[in-house]
């Protein structure tokens, strides 16, 4: 899994000094953008190929509190890929303690909103996702 580090900002906390739950969703987006960029398919490359990938689902399970100024390490991996949709898994930790786990699910569309069949239309991107899916399975011990 790829790791992204987010340093908790004071403004992300609530009156009790705990990170507000909505921030974890934003952190997943930060980690996803970083993950894809480090692997060679940054969002501007998607857009240059006429691809958009809107979020069609998100979930997050909160395990422990995060506080200012914790450093949260976010591991991202591709958990599912169908050729039309993909799901990214996130594990968020401070030190070795899991504070949250979640997923975002995305579809792949042309900029005019038509479903994109990656394997047929952009084989290079299909291979990219297949490689990430296999790596994600190995890192999570899926068989």
Image (cartoon, rainbow, N blue to C red):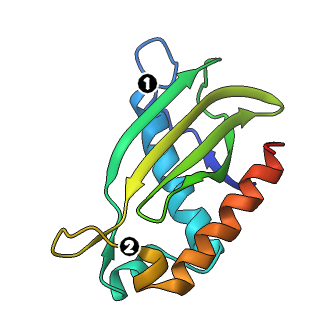
Above/below status of 106 relative to 142: below
Is the C terminus in the top left, top right, bottom left or bottom right quadrant?
Answer: top right
Cα–Cα gap, marks 1 and 2: 37 Å
Q: In which quarter of the image is residue 45?
A: bottom left
- Above or below residue 116? Residue 64 is above
Label of residue 117 in the image:
2
- Tell me the SS state at disc 2: loop
Circle 1 Cα neighbour tier, 10 Å, few/some/many (<14 / 14–19 / ≥20): some
Q: Quickly name the residue at label 1.
A: 20
Residue at 37% from the left image edge and 40% from the top image edge: 57
Few, some or many residues within 10 Å of mark 2 (<14, 14–19, 20+): some
Left or right: residue 83 compared with residue 8: left
In this picture, residue 77 sits left or right of residue 86: right
**Which type of secondary structure does the marked residue at label 1 adopt?**
loop
Quarter of the figure with residue 12: top left
Q: Where is residue 53 in the image (x, y as percent from the top left)?
A: 35, 63
Residue 99, position in %: x, y? 66, 26
């Amino acid at each position: 899994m790829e790791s992204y580090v987010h340093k908790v900002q004071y403004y992300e906390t609530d009156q009790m000094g705990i990170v507000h739950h909505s921030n974890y969703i934003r952190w997943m987006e930060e980690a996803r953008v970083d993950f894809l960029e480090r692997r060679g398919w940054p969002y501007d490359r998607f857009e240059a190929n006429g691809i958009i990938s809107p979020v069609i689902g998100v979930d997050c399970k909160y395990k422990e509190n995060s506080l200012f100024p914790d450093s949260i390490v976010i591991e991202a991996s591709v958990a599912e890929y169908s050729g039309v949709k993909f799901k990214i898994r996130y594990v968020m930790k401070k030190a070795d303690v899991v504070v949250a786990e979640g997923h975002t699910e995305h579809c792949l569309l042309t900029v005019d909103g038509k479903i994109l069949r990656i394997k047929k239309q952009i084989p290079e991107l299909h291979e990219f996702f297949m490689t990430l899916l296999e790596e994600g399975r190995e890192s999570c011990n899926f068989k």
